Image (cartoon, grey):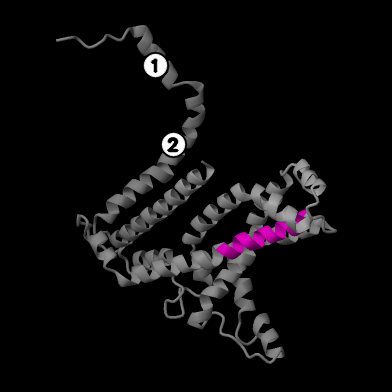
Amino acid sequence: MTSPPRVSPRSASGQVRRLFSPGLLFALPFLVLFAAFMIWPLGQGLWMSLTDTSLSAHAPSFVGLDNFTEAFKDAEMWRALGHTLWFTVISTVPLVVVALGMALLVHTGLPGQWVWRLAFFAPYLLPVGVIGLLWLWLYQPDLGLYNHLLDSLGLGTVGWLSEESVAMWAIALATLWWTVGFNFLLYLAALQSIPDHLYEAAAIDGAGGWRRLWSVTLPQLRRITVVITVLQILASLKVFDQVYLLTKGGPNGSTRPVVEYIYDVGFTGYRLGYASAISYIFFALVVLASAVQFLALRRREK
């Protein structure tokens, strides 16, 4: 039987020095904060999902996977998840297309470009509370601007936040106005990085404006479009603030996303353990969606 290799004191001290290298010391404050505000809450939430923890006075007890089993049978959870997916679809597409159009307009050399850039990006800087109050006034059934315009055209008024068939679209419109500026900025930066010699070569070949757009600009924007789409999907899946401020999930729960359902279960129904289980199911779905998008991106690059 062979004896294990001996580690000399010098090599052991070298490993200790490498462990406590200056790079690690510089990263130590971040690692401490990351562990305190990310790793520990994740572990605590996972443990909570295996118990019947609530805001009541009784001590929590271990229930195993009962919360997850109940969640998979919960029709309201699946309904809220469906609302989340529907909002993701109707918000992601315009947030990508409209941002691209805005960036192309500014990049073509419109007069007063700084005004256009400020106007397109400024709403993104507003807090969600301001956005909610502003669009509540715009959507007012009697005094709101939109219904006033429709009424002046003889088209009648619309219950923007009170009709089930319209409310989610109204939230998506408010979200588009609020957040499209960030995607616009990413597209504008990508447009400015396209080499000029590509356009010069296309012009020499006799390509017009539309041909240069389809053959030069859009192919060069393919990578940033994928990045923007992935980021937007992940952001839309986590929608909560504007929905809660505008409709509180109504009417009749037709706009309640899964994050708001988790909030209602945990802080209105006092079932923190069950809410934690739902949140981890949703977390797994988001991770799965991110992995699928990442693999699709890698395959497209190859």
Residue type highlighted by circle 2:
Val
Residue type highlighted by circle 1:
Gln
Q: Few, some or many C-alpha atoms within 10 Å of disc 2 (few <14, some 14-19, many ≥20)?
A: few
Q: What SS does tag 2 mark?
A: helix
Disc 1 or 2, which lies upstream in sequence? 1
For residue 286, the mark is: none
| In the image, residue 247 lies in the stretch drawn in magenta | no
Nearer to me, 203 or 48? 203
Identify the main secondary structure in magenta.
helix
Quadrant where the N terminus sits is top left
Judge left or right: residue 170 versus residue 35. Answer: right
Across and down, in percent, residue 229 comes to 55, 55
Nearer to me, 227 or 202? 202
| In the image, residue 97 lies in the stretch drawn in magenta | yes
For residue 32, the mark is: 2
Which residue has dot 1 on it? 15
Real-space Cα separation, disc 1 to disc 2, in angstroms = 22 Å
Across and down, in percent, residue 91 comes to 55, 65
* Residue at x 28% of width, y 64% of height: 72
Q: Are marks 1 and 2 in contact (CB under 8 Å)?
A: no
Bounds of the magenta span? 93-107
Q: What SS does tag 1 mark?
A: helix
Residue 13 falls in image quadrant: top left
* Residue at x 25% of width, y 54% of height: 50
* Residue at x 52% of width, y 28% of height: 26
Number of on-image labels: 2
Q: Is residue 174 above or below residue 157?
A: above
Across and down, in percent, residue 205 comes to 79, 47
* Residue at x 63% of width, y 55% of height: 183
Q: Is residue 92 visible?
A: yes
Q: Is residue 130 visible?
A: no
